[in-house]
Image (cartoon, rainbow, N blue to C red):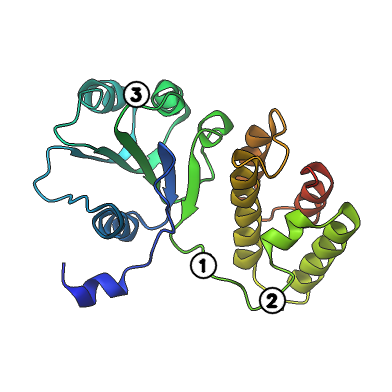
Amino acid sequence: MSANQSKTLKTLNCDFTHHAYCLLGEPEATLASLKNDLQELLNFTTLANPDFYLHQYNELKVGSVRDDILKHTFTRPFGPLKVVTIVADSINDDSQNVLLKFFEEPIPQTKVFLILPSGRKILPTISSRLITLRLDSGVAKSEHDFLSAPDFLSGNIAYRIAQAEEINKSLKDEKITRKEVRDFVQAVFREYLDRAKGGNLKSVPGMAEMLAKISSYTEDESPSWKGILEYLAVSLPLK
């Protein structure tokens, strides 16, 4: 890949510290960005590398999970790192249940990436074990100060409610888009998980699973943004 081609790829903003990720976006572009980030950030090449496993499906079914993914990827890597990438246009519940143990327990020296067009049908039990990133998430700072995930988590409940109301009003007035609100909610989730992991915020039992369920709601055609934002305002722990 040329330097010019590399510059045109969107970054996934992946820190590669977790063992398993769900990457949402157009599959071909997301896969290209993942390969580029692996090379640039980890010096891990995906070309003719026996430690890079790529599985691609129109629909990921149970048989493929058992015969392709689970059968061939629990092997020891030849080098210091093995990367397993699963690309699917769709995935059913049965396949996800079979994959659960694969995502639940980290495999030594292995990173796993599940690439899907949308997170709408991901089971909460799966998404709670993955770090979800969106290729088009635009994690760069928004021009709107009220779309700040760190400020939201750092504020008290009254501040959060006020911020939620401003976001909801701006969405109704079409000053911001649904995508911006969805990205804000995803950023709040990541911020909470990072702070809880670092001991800078109380880790609430079951909160990761609840956030995963809420994340699936944001993929609906007409989610209740007001309800989602207000729930986050009162339910996420205070610093």
Closer to the camera: disc 3 or disc 1? 1
Q: In the drawing, what numbered circle is on residue 144?
A: 2
Q: Residue at (40%, 21%) from the top-left corner?
A: 98
Q: In the drawing, what numbered circle is on residue 62?
A: 3
Q: Is mark 1 on a helix, strand or loop?
A: loop
143 shown above or below 33: below
Percent from the top left, x then y, of residue 58? Answer: 30, 42
Type of residue at label 3?
A: Val
Q: Residue at (54%, 45%) from the top-left corner?
A: 120
Q: Is residue 152 left or right of residue 53?
A: right
CA distance for labels 2 and 3: 44 Å
Circle 2 residues within 10 Å: few <14, some 14–19, many ≥20:
few
Q: Is mark 2 on a helix, strand or loop?
A: loop
Res. 189 visible in picture? yes
Quick check: marks 2 and 1 in contact, CB under 8 Å?
no
Percent from the top left, x then y, of residue 203? Answer: 69, 35
Q: Please identify the quarter of the rendering in which residue 4 is found.
A: bottom left
The residue wearing badge 1 is: 138
Type of residue at label 1?
A: Gly
Could you say which is closer to the camera, residue 82 or residue 185?
82
Circle 1 residues within 10 Å: few <14, some 14–19, many ≥20:
some
